[in-house]
Amino acid sequence: METNAYGNQKKGGDSFRRKWDSTTYEQKARDREQQLRKEEEDEDRRRKGLKPRPAFTRETREPLELLQARTATVNLEGMIGKSQVVQASSAASGQPGFYCKVCDVTVKDSLSYLDHINGKKHQRILNRSMTVATETVEDVVAKLESLRQARNRRMAPSEYDFQKQVNAQQQLEDIKRQKRRETRRRHRQEKALAASKDASNSVEPDDEMAAMMGFGAFGSSKK
């Protein structure tokens, strides 16, 4: 084993030297070169009156999803008739209006809010493009079939419950009988009241009242 000038054993080869990851630094060098080239291209585009290219490229970003239909209902009337405390802060969530959690912005009215959530910036943050999926003939046929089945389910008659129908008919008959009894009782009461009035009007005056009025007694008298 070799020893150094201090009498210590030498380590094998140049292992004491610092090691560099050549692959990582080569990638950093390529990225730096690409960034410099992009800055030069952006400067040329600015001189020509064009907008600079986006910071990301199609090769490095994730593939965008196709535009999808919204499943949740947008609540635009939830704040009607309510009071909101406006905070004296610069946070978007504390400002009055319609707040978007995805983009952390607040818009002032419902029309602007709908334009925002349907816009390109909002969909891009959700990793979606503005391209709608192209439906095939099979997709259209399957959709029509599902709609037809849903309509048939709505139009199908419910299961017939015999005992339930019997009970409902019996209740209806009981109500009719009760109404007929009340009608007959009311008619009897009206007839009894009319008869009592007629009897009170046909009572004959007594003999004293007849004598005072000059009427003689009616009927035969014994001699």
Image (cartoon, helix red, strand yellow):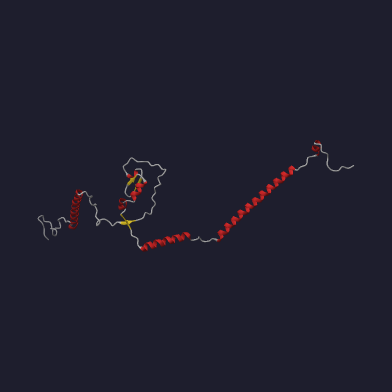
Residue 199 sits in quarter: top right
Image point (43%, 61%), residue name: 148
Q: Residue 119 in the image: x percent, y percent?
A: 32, 51
In front of the other: 150 or 84: 150
Q: Residue at x 62, y 52 (%)?
A: 179
The N terminus lies in quadrant: bottom left
Q: Residue furthest right?
A: 223
Residue 146 placement (x, y as % from top left):
41, 61
Quadrant location of residue 62?
A: bottom left
Q: Residue furthest left?
A: 5
Residue 35, compared with residue 108, is above or below; it is below
Residue extending farthest to the front is 214
Res. 8 image quadrant: bottom left
Horizontal and vertical percent position of residue 204: 78, 41
| Lateral position of residue 141 relative to residue 1, left or right | right
Q: Residue at coordinates 64% horizontally, 52% vertically from top-left?
A: 180
Query: Is 45 left or right of 195, judged from the image as shown?
Result: left
Side (left or right) of 160 relative to 64? right
Describe residue 72's horizontal placement relative to residue 19 as left or right. right
Q: Nearer the viewer, residue 66 or 50?
A: 50
Please tell me whether residue 223 is drawn above or below residue 152 in the rendered image.
Answer: above
Identify the image quadrant of the C terminus.
top right
Question: Which one is nearer the viewer's eye here, 36 or 179?
Answer: 179
Specify the farthest residue to the top: 212
